[in-house]
């Protein structure tokens, strides 16, 4: 998906004794908020965000919701309900009102929590593979080992001796094997700490990523779906492993103005695997609302 793209501004917003880093693609057009997936980072939106900015004129904000606050020492989790509150304050501070919203995985769920509790009033939302776990999951306490997603992330390799080793490793793993080349480079360049000896470590450690997944149990999003007042498109990957325990077609049916689309050849990480098709689906949905 390579085209000449303008790099975004990298800013920080101070609030409540913490800082949230964010990317900004400035424009005089409609405001668009882009929320990244669990354990990843806003830079992975860049191939899509830059074109939404340059070709469609969106004024884009993409916050980094991973490192700005500590993990809860009692639960070992980073609550998505707390992250939703942080996002609400972030939007208020930057006066982001009635924005379009795109969220992936955790980001999609956080957007749902904000909008469902009527703390965010988006014009429309695209939710890519939101983590709407089976309802009974939200009423029980489970360990990292019992969590279907945290149990995988806690074992993720997080250190490599060189950039070449990191790229080769990523390409050898099923999770990353279908990623667009540009997005792999973005992940290595911006999602990893580069040390003087040439080694690399993940910025979002396996422990923090697992804490983020554990935080997904903090609030049940299912009762909120019927309260979403804006048009919502849910996008699901036809090859996503999450389809075994998350029914996104049913979720879309609960939203008053809900729409559903499947991208057949993609897994859970749709924007990384199919950025061109993802961009097309987003743009067509938003443009249809004008």
Image (cartoon, rainbow, N blue to C red):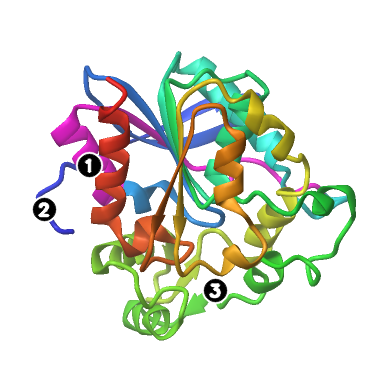
Q: Is residue 59 magenta?
A: yes
Q: Specify start and end residues of the magenta stretch as a single range.
A: 46-72
Dot 3 falls on a residue whose secondary structure is: loop
Whether residue 66 is visible = no
First along the sequence among labels 2 and 3: 2
Which numbered marker is on residue 158? 3
Whether residue 176 is visible = yes
First along the sequence among labels 1 and 2: 2
Which numbered marker is on residue 3? 2
State the image coordinates of residue 193 (x, y, percent, origin top left). 45, 63
**Looking at the picture, does residue 89 appear above or below residue 133?**
above
Mark 3 surroundings: few (<14), some (14-19) or many (≥20) residues within 10 A: some
Dot 1 falls on a residue whose secondary structure is: helix
State the image coordinates of residue 237 (x, y, percent, origin top left). 44, 61
Q: Is residue 285 magenta?
A: no
Task: Check contact, mark 1 vs mark 2: CB within 8 A.
Answer: yes
Distance of mark 1 from mark 2, alpha carbons? 9 Å
- Give the residue drawn at x 71%, y 49%: 216
**Looking at the picture, does residue 30 appear above or below residue 189?**
above
Image side of residue 59 versus residue 132, left or right: left
- Give the residue drawn at x 27%, y 54%: 277
- Name the residue tied to disc 1: 50
Q: Quadrant of the N terminus?
A: bottom left
Distance of mark 3 from mark 1, alpha carbons? 28 Å
């Amino acid at each position: 998906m390579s085209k000449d793209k303008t790099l975004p501004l990298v800013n920080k917003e101070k609030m409540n004794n913490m800082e949230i880093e964010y990317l900004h693609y400035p424009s005089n057009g409609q405001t668009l908020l882009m929320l990244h997936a669990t354990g990843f980072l806003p830079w992975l939106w860049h191939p899509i965000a830059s074109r939404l900015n340059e070709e469609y004129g969106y004024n884009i904000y993409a916050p980094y919701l991973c490192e700005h606050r500590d993990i809860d020492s009692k639960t070992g989790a980073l609550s998505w309900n707390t992250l939703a509150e942080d996002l609400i304050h972030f939007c208020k501070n930057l006066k982001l009102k009635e924005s379009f919203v795109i969220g992936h995985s955790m980001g999609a769920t956080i957007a749902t929590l904000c909008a469902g509790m009527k703390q965010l009033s988006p014009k429309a939302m695209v939710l890519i593979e939101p983590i709407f776990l089976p309802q009974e999951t939200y009423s029980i306490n489970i360990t990292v080992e019992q969590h279907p997603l945290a149990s995988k992330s806690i074992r993720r390799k997080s250190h490599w001796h060189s950039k070449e080793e990191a790229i080769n490793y990523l390409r050898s793993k099923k999770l990353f094997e279908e990623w667009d080349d540009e997005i792999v480079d973005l992940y290595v360049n911006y999602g990893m700490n580069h040390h003087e000896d040439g080694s690399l470590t993940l910025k979002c450690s396996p422990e923090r990523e697992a804490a983020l997944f554990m935080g997904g149990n903090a609030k049940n999003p299912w009762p909120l779906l019927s309260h979403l007042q804006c048009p919502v498109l849910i996008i699901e990957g036809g090859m996503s492993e999450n389809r075994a325990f998350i029914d996104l077609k049913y979720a879309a049916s609960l939203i008053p103005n809900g729409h559903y689309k499947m991208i057949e050849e993609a897994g859970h990480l749709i924007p990384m695997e199919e950025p061109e098709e993802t961009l097309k689906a987003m743009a067509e949905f938003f443009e249809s609302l004008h």
